[in-house]
Amino acid sequence: MTLEATVRIKRDGFTLDVSLSVPAGETLAVLGPNGAGKTTLLRALAGLDEMEGRVVLDGTVLEDTSRRVHVPAEHRRAGLVFQDHVLFPHLTALENIAFGLRAQRRPHATSVARKWLDDAGLGDRADSMPKSLSGGQAQRVALLRALATEPKLLLLDEPLAALDVSVRAEVRRELTRQLSSFRGVRVLVTHDPLEAMALADRLVVLERGSVVQTGTPDEVTARPRSRFVADLAGVNLLRGRAHGDRVALSGDASLAAVDAGTGDVFAVIHPRAVALYRARPDGTPRNVWRGEVEGVDLQGDRVRVRVNGPVPLVAEVTRGAMQELGLSVGAGVWLVVKATEVSVYPA
Amino acid sequence: MNSVITVFAAASLQPAFDKIGQRLRSNQNIVTTFSYAGTQTLTTQLTQGAPADVFASADVAHMTTLNTAGLVQESHVFAHNRLEIAVAKGNPKGIHTLADLARSGLVVVLADPSVPAGKYAQQALAKAKVTVHPASLEQQVTGVLSKVALGEADAGIVYHSDIVTSGKVDGVAIPDAQNVIADYPIAVLKAAKSQTGATQFVSFVLSPDGQTLLKAAGFQGA
Amino acid sequence: MKRARIPPAIAVLAGLGLLLFLLPLAGLIVRAPWGQALGQLTDPTTTTALGLSIFCSVTATAIALVLGIPLAMILARTRGTTRNVLRALTTLPMVLPPVVGGVALLLAFGRHGLVGSLPYRWFGLQIPFTTAAAVMAETFVAMPFLVIAVEAGLRSLDHRYEEAARSLGAGYWRVFTRVTLPLLRPAIFSGAVLCWARALGEFGATITFAGNFPGRTQTVPIAVYIGLESNNPDAAITLSLILLVVSVAILVGMRDRWLGAL
């Protein structure tokens, strides 16, 4: 069982153009900043929005605009979980779960729904109305509601984003547990890298309607291909033209790297590999630039220092080092990066 | 001298009084404002203190009410009006007598018994020993006329003057033995602002010229 | 922030405005024939008019629900010019003088009317002067209140509930009856109450289109008018008081929350 989809949507100067192939048993996370088109993609897969292209689930054509095939949402067997539960406010938790079972004319809707609640440890909330459930409970019920109809495709739209940090872990646990026992195809949309890393087997990074990168979470963060991924991985991403051991960056700057190859490349430098000095250091480090501190972010006992200059970089130092160096906004510093700490790969 | 007076007059008097108003304006420099409505409406309004100089009623009873209340001066009957059956042009339903109004399937509209025309109609039907089942009891005799003119009603009992001036319906005469003749009294109000103008108006209505105009509108003279 | 003080002139004008509402009510209450109120209430004219009024207004509200909710759904879906035209058409009876509405109904549904001539020609059925005509007149005048309330409810409805229901396998009618209608319940309820109140108070269109006959088309407002005209003000005042009590009860019962839907 797999999902094969090619989705194109044009709308008010925005174009979404995405191809996906997701095998059953795998959780695909569509990761991207707000406005990248993630929700639009999910709604198209659910059959709620008009689209162009083709969607095939488990051999069944759900959408094929060239042949004017469109299976309406209610016949897609695609369960949808929204960011903010969207439980029916006039029905109890139990009736919310039973709703889909009744709609699909399954026998024993009430007892099946009750079993789902009991299994999730929510049996005592069966008769509660959604507004009396906590945010975490409501989202868990929403997940059960989608799963109870045994969909072939589970679509999750930022399922943790609307929750308080304190309950996020609770729902994430439930989500992990349910996803691992769910046999269909799972597509998760999120702008939160932690959520993606925690839940996904594979990532698709979406920016401005296009896929910029795909791969396992490790692959994607190790070799970011966009500012968005680099930022969420917490690394410095530079782009330039490689020639032997050097990468020519924009402006006059260049970067020394080992085996940079040739052609357009990305170069990634981890902030911890960026050393800071008050004075120009001695010795022969090959990457030395002058810069000015633009911002300082405290993160526990570590400090991330944003430095502007010919090569703008983020450096990570200890608090002690920050005080020794007297780092404050506007201070001049020297940046040093060993060539061996620069990872280069083709763009 | 130029005087302005307000006349409260029964709805059925409108065609005749409009002409009288025009005549008075050109001949005697009296400017008349008319308020036409069902006699009972006007009586209620006058009882509640509505300002007017002259009241012309479609029956004696309402004039008596105002007289008892001490609101009017001496009244004079200035015209009579016969009842008549109003039917559609050409009388397609073949209505010739009051008894025909009792035929089933016929839509008959009367004025409400609180209106003089309605009260007279009931008296006439009683005299003819006819029971009709009206579809509606209209608030003004003109309402009866318009329902017949619009074709929503097959017949209604109205004044002869209404049929003469309407032109949109035909009249079927009611024999004297069954007919009720309405008496129209007129009086100057005690609270009239322009006693002279009001008296002049009443005099003109009673004068040969006024009577001619009333007869032209289908009334019988005093 | 401290709000600016209200100048005395504004307060005086506001007070005068309030008096305009208050004094007529006071007049009704003070002049009511309390001693005979009970007798008036059991008078056949009163009870007949009340019974007819309740029947007509409830029927009109039921018809408004059946026709008005679909109309509101269409309205809530349309945009631009179509919407403006449809909206103007459906809300016209709210601003049209009811008497004009009655004349228009007569010209459309009278036995020589555009539509009314057909049942008359085929079956000899005539709409004016019947209880059906009174119901139609009340529906004509009152339905816009329901349509407006339900349309507002639909426009503020979070359509993701319907989408969630569809993704769970619910077809159009199941979504409509199990999700959309229950979610619209407050809007439908407030719209129906306003519609019913307007229907109960309807006078002009009813007397013009349906005429006046006790037990058939003489509703409470018409009985009030007739009572006042035929030198029977006590009956008129008693019936007016009943309508007043009903109106106040509606306002108190509905509170701002539901009236806010307008």
Image (cartoon, rainbow, N blue to C red):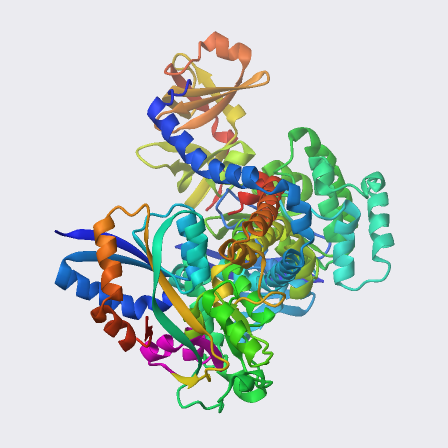
Q: Is residue B162 magenta?
A: yes
Q: Is C5 situated above or below C218?
A: above
Q: Is residue A80 left or right of residue A326?
A: right
Which of the two residues, A278 or A53, is positioned nearer the viewer here?
Answer: A53
Q: Is residue C179 left or right of residue A121?
A: left
- Picture quarter containing residue A286? top left
Which of the two residues, A121 or A323, is positioned nearer the viewer here?
Answer: A121
Residue B179 visible to an observer of this rendering: yes
Counting labels gives 0
Q: Is residue A326 magenta?
A: no
Which of the two residues, A234 or B77, is positioned nearer the viewer here?
Answer: B77
Residue A23 visible to an observer of this rendering: no
- Picture quarter containing residue B16? bottom left
Q: Is A208 situated above or below A74?
A: above
Q: In the rendering, at what x and y percent does residue A3 appear?
A: 65, 61
User: Residue at (40%, 37%) from the top-left corner?
Assistant: A247
Q: Is A195 situated above or below A302?
A: below
- Picture quarter containing residue A163? top right
Q: In the rendering, at what x and y percent does residue B26 appear?
A: 13, 63
Which of the two residues, A117 or A324, is positioned nearer the viewer here?
Answer: A117
Q: In the rendering, at what x and y percent does residue C71 appear?
A: 53, 63
Q: Quadrant of the N terminus of chain C?
A: top left
User: Residue at (72%, 60%) from the top-left corner?
Assistant: A152
Q: In the rendering, at what x and y percent does residue B162 appear?
A: 37, 75
Q: Where does the magenta region start and end?
A: B146-169
User: Residue at (60%, 65%) from the top-left corner?
Assistant: C214
